[in-house]
């Protein structure tokens, strides 16, 4: 298989004279039934591809199908053309790979309305049989949302491949029916993604068949994020990039196209199940389990787009804050496939349960454990060294956040001994203990371009900053109470999430209180307050602060997003410098406008919460990270509070529900960002 870093670009373009002569995409004119298929590493032998084009289960005859080949970032070349027959079938014969082995194909329609366009992105495997329909279009557009511009798809090579590899999770490109991950009980019965997919697909069918011109115009207008789309592909692209923008209006159009019978029986929509109620957004969200995932803490993305996390507890255990069995380290591929061993995950070097301590270097994964052990492994999960290799082995407390610097230095927070561990150039044997004034249960760590180390303290309202080569010059910055995750944007601004708003009474914790005991005491304090209604979804607590490189803050009391922030935990920055946060008690994934970021509605300002994503697959989220394709991955850390904190007589049937189930992904909603996240956020190349 070719390297994930090899150059790749593919373009879906309406077939017309101008585009054939000059490679120029024309928005108007011939409407298209579009099929973009990315295939890599073809065998040397010629290949015949057979396909079928359908809409609402009916054949689409007379559609032109064109195969294009791309060589890196150059304009694609026209390889083959054919047309679908009276039954909607087509065949592309004698296809041979180019040197790079990258091909895709598109189709333009003549037998359907000019403004109906469909697509299917197949991924990296050449297929002899494909189906293109409204469902493959929704799946392809949402997973490739960050790479679609008009009818073109292009972008950073790895991101494009990740996007293509995730489309089959939603819809099988061979059958044009639902994908295996969507059909998994973890998704088909636990969230509304299946119904959202079918609802959008049915609206595309209505657009091309039964709807009148007024309905079609209303649909296009409801999906516009800038200019009004000219076809269904552009309309879906608008929904995919901002699925929160106009969901009620879109559902109203669905209701008009397929009215609900008065007796409550089925609508006549071609795809079931469909949504029964207007959603808060149309995001495509899936959850992935296995590989030892249970109560994941901090997430990391590696250089190939794989997802890593140390987990609090072991799957199947009746774990909570009073007693627990620690988990290992898990790895998912960029399409969510579990690559770590079941139940235990990757283990070794004495690690027994991981909180916030997952760090990603360029070629190594670092995890720090509740029990004071440190694990280091390569990107295949193989341990590097042994527990005794660390000079401070057995002399440290409960370990939390791991920060990696551009120069390869690794820093680890010791949450119970109020100190840091420093490993110059990431060398295990050279590790030393560093004492820094002002640390109080250090938690999150980030290192900026000036090699200054930023550390949050979870038993205070302070973020500490010091030069890596001179910890005596530490500075302190006030933020919210119980400071947690930290991240740097491209401008060098540090963003920090704090569980509580300024002035909120933090629990009194004796020095050296174990981390799990801290969680226990904080939860015990919060539950009575929430029972009184002092803190609730309508009156939440928690803030995000931004500290500029010069130490100033645009909002010293923090951003609450008009109260959309509810006990936030982790924070990450995407390629647009927007801020993603785990809205822990709000059971959601939050998107906040960053420092002077672009692409938002007029009037949006720094610190505004643009949207909070919620789903049956989104539980109590600690962390959110963005990958190279613009997918937002979320860690379901806790789920059932009673199972977490009841130590007297818990309901036996739910004693395994304390930890969160799986890691969830929201497809294509963020601006792609480089990984691993070392230093300031950077756009991928």
Image: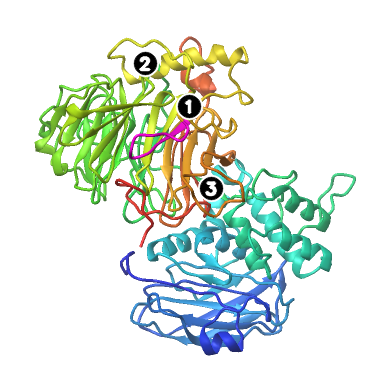
In-image side of 119 versus 558 (left or right): right
At 69% across and 50% down in the image, what residue appears?
246
**First in sequence: mark 2 or mark 3?**
3
> Helix, strand or loop at disc 1?
loop
**Residue 628 vertical position relative to residue 635 in the rendered view, above or below:** below
**3 or 1: tag closer to the N-terminus:** 3
**Which residue position holds label 1?**
557
Q: Nearer the viewer, mark 2 or mark 3?
A: 2
- Quadrant (top left, top right, bottom left, bottom right) of the N terminus: bottom left
Q: Is residue 110 left or right of residue 468?
A: right
Can residue 646 be seen here? The reply is no
Q: Specify whether residue 549 is painted magenta.
A: yes
Per the image, the residue denoted by label 3 is 286
From the image, state whether disc 3 or disc 1 is nearer to you: 1
For residue 162, above or below residue 350: below
Q: Marks 2/1: CA distance?
A: 28 Å
Q: Residue 214, percent across and down?
A: 83, 64
Q: CA distance from mark 3 to mark 1?
A: 35 Å
- Label 2: which residue? 517
Secondary structure at numbered mark 2 = helix
Query: Can you say whether 205 is above or below 306 in the image?
Result: below
**Residue that appears at 58% across and 45% down:** 604
């Amino acid at each position: 298989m070719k390297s994930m870093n090899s150059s790749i670009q593919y373009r879906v373009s309406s077939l017309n004279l101008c585009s054939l002569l000059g490679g120029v995409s024309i928005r108007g004119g011939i409407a298209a039934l579009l099929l973009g298929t990315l295939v890599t590493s073809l065998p040397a032998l010629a290949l015949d591809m057979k396909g079928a084009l359908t809409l609402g289960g009916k054949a689409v005859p007379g559609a032109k199908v064109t195969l294009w080949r791309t060589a890196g970032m150059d304009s694609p070349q026209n390889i083959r053309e054919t047309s679908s027959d009276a039954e909607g079938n087509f065949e592309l014969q004698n296809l041979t790979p180019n040197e790079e082995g990258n091909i895709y194909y598109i189709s333009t329609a003549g037998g359907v309305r000019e403004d109906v366009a469909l697509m299917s992105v197949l991924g990296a495997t050449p297929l002899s049989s494909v189906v293109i329909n409204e469902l493959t279009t929704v799946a392809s557009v949402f997973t490739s949302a960050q790479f679609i511009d008009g009818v073109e798809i292009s972008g950073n090579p790895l991101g494009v491949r990740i996007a293509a590899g995730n489309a089959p999770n939603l819809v099988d490109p061979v059958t044009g029916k639902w994908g295996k991950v969507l059909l998994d009980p973890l998704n088909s019965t636990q969230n509304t993604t299946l119904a959202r997919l079918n609802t959008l697909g049915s609206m595309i069918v209505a657009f091309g068949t039964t709807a009148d011109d007024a309905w079609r115009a209303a649909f296009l207008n409801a999906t516009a994020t800038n200019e009004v789309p000219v076809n269904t592909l552009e309309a879906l692209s608008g929904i995919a990039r901002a699925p929160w923008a106009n969901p009620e209006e879109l559902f109203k159009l669905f209701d008009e196209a397929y009215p609900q019978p008065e007796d409550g029986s089925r609508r006549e929509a071609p795809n079931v199940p469909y949504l029964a109620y207007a959603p808060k957004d149309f995001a495509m969200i899936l959850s992935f389990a296995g590989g030892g995932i249970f109560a994941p803490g901090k997430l990391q993305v590696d250089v190939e787009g794989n997802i890593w996390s140390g987990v609090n507890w072991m799957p199947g255990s009746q774990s909570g804050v009073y007693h627990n069995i620690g988990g290992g380290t898990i790895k998912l591929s960029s399409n969510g496939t579990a690559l770590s061993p079941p139940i235990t995950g990757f283990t070794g070097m004495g690690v027994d349960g991981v909180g916030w301590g997952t760090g990603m270097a360029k070629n190594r994964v670092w995890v720090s454990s509740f029990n004071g052990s440190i694990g280091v492994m390569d990107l295949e999960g193989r341990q590097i060294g042994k527990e005794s290799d660390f000079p401070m082995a057995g002399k440290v407390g409960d370990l939390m956040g791991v920060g990696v610097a551009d120069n390869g230095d690794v820093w680890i927070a010791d949450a119970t001994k109020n100190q840091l561990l420093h490993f110059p150039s990431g060398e295990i044997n050279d590790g030393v203990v560093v004492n820094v004034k002002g640390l109080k249960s250090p938690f999150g760590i980030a290192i900026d371009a000036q090699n200054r180390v930023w550390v949050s303290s979870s038993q205070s309202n302070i973020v500490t900053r010091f030069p890596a080569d001179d910890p005596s010059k530490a500075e302190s910055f006030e933020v919210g109470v119980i400071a947690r995750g930290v991240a740097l944007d491209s401008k060098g601004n540090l963003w920090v999430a704090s569980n509580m708003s300024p002035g909120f009474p933090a629990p009194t914790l004796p020095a050296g209180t174990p981390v799990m005991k801290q969680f226990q005491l904080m939860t015990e304090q919060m539950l009575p307050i929430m029972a009184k209604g002092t803190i609730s979804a309508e009156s939440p607590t928690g803030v995000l602060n931004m500290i500029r490189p010069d130490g100033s803050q645009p909002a010293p009391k923090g951003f609450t997003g008009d109260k959309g922030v509810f006990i936030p935990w982790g924070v990450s920055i995407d390629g647009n410098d927007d801020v993603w946060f785990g809205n822990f008690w709000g059971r959601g994934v939050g998107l906040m406008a960053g420092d002077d970021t672009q692409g938002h509605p007029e009037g949006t300002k720094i610190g505004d919460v643009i949207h909070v994503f919620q789903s049956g697959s989104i539980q109590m989220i600690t962390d959110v990270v963005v990958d190279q394709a613009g997918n937002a991955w979320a860690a379901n850390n806790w789920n059932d509070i009673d199972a977490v904190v009841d130590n007297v007589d818990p309901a036996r049937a739910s004693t395994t529900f304390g930890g969160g189930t799986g890691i969830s992904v929201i497809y294509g909603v963020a601006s792609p960002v480089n990984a691993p996240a070392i230093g300031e956020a950077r756009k991928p190349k």
